[in-house]
Amino acid sequence: MAKETHEFQAETKQLLDLMIHSIYTNHEIFLRELISNASDAIDKVHFASLTNRDILEGDDSFEIFLQPDPEAHTLTISDNGIGMSRQEVIENIGTIAKSGTKAFMEQLKKAKEASEKGEAGSEDKDLIGQFGVGFYSAFMVADKVTIETRKAGETQATRWESTGDGSYTIEDGSREKRGTSITMTLGKEFYGDASEENYTDTYKLERLVKKYSDYVRYPIRMTFEWEETPRDKDGKEIEGAEKEKKSEVRTLNSMQPLWTRNKSEIKEEEYTEFFKNQFHEWEKPMEVFHTHAEGSVEYTALLCIPSRAPFNLYHTDYEPGVQLYSRHVFIMDKCKDLLPDYLRFVKGLVDSPDLSLNISRELLQQSRELKVIGKALEKNILKALSRKMKNKREDYEAFWNEFGKSLKIGVYNSMYSGSDTMDKLKDLLLFLSSKDGKLVSLKEYTERMPESQKKIYYATAKDKETIEHLPQMETLRDKGLEVLYLLDPVDEFCIETLREYDGKPFHSISRGDLDLEDAESQEVKKETEDIQKKNDALMKDIKEVLGDKVADVKVSARLKSSAVCLVADEAGPSLSMEQTFAEMDN
Ligand code: ADP
Ligand code: MG
């Protein structure tokens, strides 16, 4: 096919522009990103080869090769992974299909502004990894990027080239072996002995690989060249002899999987680097679980709760799941069936000799072994969370703020899954309380409620202020009764599913009657009923005037200084649920 020039998508252009001119000073991570892509591509061909050996075309010695060229000012990263077809190059490289791109650019802009204002901490956030725009990071150091690639199982290679200025060219390539080579023609700050960031320097590259990519499970190799004076048979340098050129191919990464090492010997930074490397994390995880078990099923798990929720955690394009390995051999990415969906934010991997390499994904996901492992891990994680809540409340609240929604959705979904999830999660829930404006658990709420109080009161609205101005709040405040503020629409779904806690039903203060049970309230109730009876005619009149707009008109005891208030029907959906439904329909 002929050579074609394509324009980048507008978003890609913007992204490239930001990347090239960004304040993002941690240039060196481009290497990690490209190596990680190479490793992903090898995973893919490896996985495909489990069911179709022919795809390897006899080459099963997977490797990633770094080739710096100080004279040409280039650095090439090659892999013998799955490669790309022409169409795939256009789709994967030329356009940014991911919905996160816009969010990424906004973050990058914010970071840029923050740094211009001299605010600290703006650049240490590894934004690039978070949003998976890894490939484009090559343009941070390169004036020109060239891709030569051939897809496994196809014959035609493709060549892609761009200077990052808005367009790229695509044409037939000449690569014979399957896989991909990415050649960066480095910018002038990024080569030469005088440069602090010389990416043609083999020792520099070696250090970077050790720092960022040590656990990559395929060998990352490079040729080292040096000059040496020849030696005699006693090992002495021969005087006056001309220096000889020597070279040797070395593997730069240890490849020893971190999870196979002894827990006590692993430093915190090593765990952090590991999750950054393999799981696109960009900050230190909030919690790391490293467990080994030898019961009916043997396994090692290395999981983490990230420090922040990904921006798309609840979007359909977020793929939850952990990686599976068997005897350190990668089986699959993102296995969704290991952990329950309410733990969708957990990242990491499970390595078990009891998982079979050669069965289909479908069968694997139903395997007894996987279920046993999943149950045990779920239990561990829940235990750790409940411990955190007891002993490190502040940390737990930080967790709650990031991932609480997942647990609340989990409770709500237990309505359909019919599982015991609700019981497992109910003590991990927190709600904002009217008491001191702090988060409170249901246990804490019920333990401190007066004996005469029989219900757990809650109110729903978009914000705190709205609830605080509810006429009903006045009565409750006067009586010293605590109210849970449900500000997230999910809160209410969650409460509706729970129905009660410790035998105490939930009661919406914006729905039906307050139904306070103390003596005073009973008296008021009777009085109200009398007034209602006496004014029956008036109520009927008002109802007639309002017609379909309301379901009923009642005399109420819940008002103090307001004359009227709107309440939702006891049996129907609450006001804020109605609002949520209305928004969903739009
Ligand atoms: P991500 O790795 O998060 O998908 P990247 O920007 O790093 O995002 O890469 C974009 C896409 O380009 C990858 O998903 C993959 O399809 C393709 N790609 C990049 N590098 C390679 C490679 N070395 N071999 C095959 N495909 C690649
Ligand atoms: Mg990538």
Image: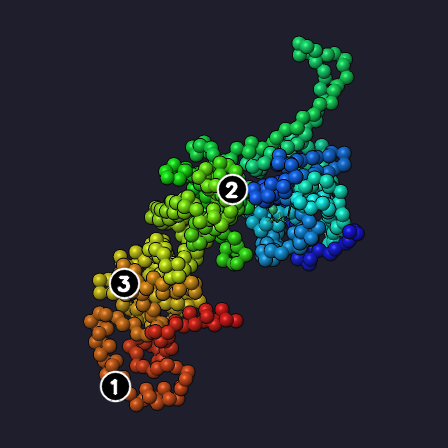
Q: Earlier in the sequence, mark 2 or mark 3?
A: 2
Specify the amino acid type for callout 2.
Asn
Q: Earlier in the sequence, mark 1 or mark 3?
A: 3
Looking at the rendered structure, the number of numbered marks drawn on it comes to: 3
Is residue 567 rendered to the left or right of residue 66?
A: left
Question: Picture coordinates of residue 379 (x, y %)?
Answer: 37, 47
Q: Residue at x 47, y 48 (%)?
A: 363
Q: Which residue is drawn at 77% across and 54% down?
A: 5
Q: Which disc number belongs to residue 358?
A: 2
> Counting other residues with Cα less than 10 Å from the Cα at mark 2, is it few (<14), some (14-19), or many (20 or more)?
few
Question: Picture coordinates of residue 52 (x, y %)?
Answer: 59, 43
- Read off the residue under disc 1: 533
* Rendered position, 216 above or below 541: above
Kindly tell me whether residue 401 is visible in this rendering: no
Specify the amino acid type for callout 3.
Lys
Q: Earlier in the sequence, mark 2 or mark 1?
A: 2
Q: From mark 2 to mark 3, how far is it between C-alphas?
A: 51 Å
Is residue 55 rendered to the left or right of residue 557?
A: right
Q: Which disc number belongs to residue 151?
A: none
Residue occupying the far top of the picture: 234
> Counting other residues with Cα less than 10 Å from the Cα at mark 3, is it few (<14), some (14-19), or many (20 or more)?
some
- Read off the residue under disc 3: 504
Q: From mark 1 to mark 3, how far is it between C-alphas?
A: 31 Å
Question: Which residue is nearer to you in this view: 87 or 401?
Answer: 87
Specify the amino acid type for callout 1.
Lys
Asked where in the image residue 39 lies, by quadrant, the reply is: top right
Q: Which residue is drawn at 21% across and 76% down?
A: 523
**Under tag 1, what secondary structure?**
helix
* Rendered position, 314 above or below 74: below
Asked where in the image residue 513 lies, by quadrant, the reply is: bottom left
Q: Residue at x 25, y 86 (%)?
A: 533
